[in-house]
């Protein structure tokens, strides 16, 4: 393993935690809190939000014609996304217990909470929930694929990548044949960090 790369990836993980802490401070700034998986704004904040709602007629009127024309194309993507959601759920339910891979918790990635924003009209809420679902499914599928790759082919790429998934730091260096043959069985079962993180983390609230 490349110790320098592992160190940088660990720093990225710590930075992600720092970003999460900063985002949690926004609860105070924007007068809401999350309790038992539900978002609750203060009555004063909700009243202010309702004053900023854009009526549906105005929302349509102010939208460009080409935006409205391409809306059916965007929404047609719900079919492959929903199928991906179904198939990845079946796949990990069937295969991960056999491989000894911890299952990815779907609810950790799919969050449907934007409908609680009173300053959005019904169309904006609908679009926002669709985006949350679609991106959540893709993120969940990426994590399922990452854990699968760790089991079947945990080897880093020689060519430059735009981004790396969460399991990449556990992979063997490209061309490191000796360690691959000696430690492949160990690495393909090295998911202790996931088990430890889940043991420390509080129970995930259900998506609402």
Image (cartoon, helix red, strand yellow):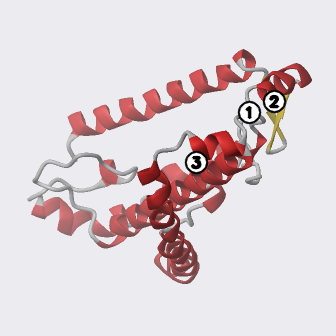
Q: Is residue 194 left or right of residue 30?
A: left
- Which residue is more in the foreground, 139 or 65? 65
Q: In the figure, 129 relative to 43: above or below?
A: below
Return the disc, 3 or 2, that comes first in the chain's sequence: 2
Instruction: Name the residue: 52% across, 30% down.
Output: 17
Q: Is residue 129 left or right of residue 191?
A: right
Measured in 3D between alpha carbons, the distance from the residue under mark 1 to the one under mark 3, in whole angstroms, is: 44 Å
Q: In the figure, 50 relative to 169: above or below?
A: above
Percent across and percent down for residue 5 are 23, 38
Percent across and percent down for residue 76 are 50, 71
Tell us which disc is closer to us: 1 or 3: 1
Instruction: Name the residue: 11% across, 64% down.
Output: 177
Check disc 2: other Cα within 10 Å, few if <14, some if 14-19, many if 20+.
Answer: some
Among the 4 quarters of the image, the one containing residue 31: top right
Check disc 1: other Cα within 10 Å, few if <14, some if 14-19, many if 20+.
Answer: some
Percent across and percent down for residue 32 are 79, 26
What residue sits right under mark 2 in the picture?
50
- Which residue is more in the foreground, 132 or 20? 132
Measured in 3D between alpha carbons, the distance from the residue under mark 3 to the one under mark 2, in whole angstroms, is: 43 Å
Q: Is residue 155 left or right of residue 15?
A: left
Percent across and percent down for residue 180 are 19, 64
Instruction: Name the residue: 8% across, 59% down.
Output: 175
The mark found on residue 53 in the picture is: 1
The mark found on residue 196 in the picture is: 3
C-beta proximity under 8 Å, tags 1 and 2: yes
Among the 4 quarters of the image, the one containing residue 93: bottom right
Tell us which disc is closer to us: 3 or 2: 2
Which SS class for mark 2? helix
Which SS class for mark 1? loop
- Which residue is more in the foreground, 183 or 75? 75
Check disc 3: other Cα within 10 Å, few if <14, some if 14-19, many if 20+.
Answer: few
Measured in 3D between alpha carbons, the distance from the residue under mark 1 to the one under mark 2, in whole angstroms, is: 5 Å
């Amino acid at each position: 393993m490349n110790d320098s790369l592992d160190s940088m990836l660990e720093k990225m993980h710590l930075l992600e935690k720092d970003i999460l802490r900063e985002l949690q401070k926004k609860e105070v700034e924007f007068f809401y809190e999350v309790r038992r998986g539900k978002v609750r704004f203060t009555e004063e904040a909700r009243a202010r939000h309702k004053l900023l709602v854009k009526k549906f007629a105005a929302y349509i009127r102010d939208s460009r014609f080409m935006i409205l024309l391409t809306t059916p194309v965007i929404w047609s993507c719900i079919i492959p996304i929903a199928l991906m959601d179904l198939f990845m759920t079946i796949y990990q339910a069937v295969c991960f217990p056999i491989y000894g891979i911890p299952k990815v918790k779907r609810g950790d990635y799919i969050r449907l909470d934007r409908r609680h924003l009173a300053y959005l009209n019904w169309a904006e809420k609908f679009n926002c929930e669709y985006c949350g679902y679609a991106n959540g499914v893709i993120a969940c599928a990426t994590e399922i694929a990452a854990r699968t790759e760790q089991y079947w082919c945990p080897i880093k790429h020689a060519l430059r990548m735009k981004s790396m998934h969460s399991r990449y730091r556990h992979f063997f260096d490209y061309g490191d044949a000796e360690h691959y043959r000696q430690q492949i069985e160990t690495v393909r079962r090295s998911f202790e960090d996931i088990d430890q993180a889940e043991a420390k983390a509080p129970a995930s609230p259900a998506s609402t």
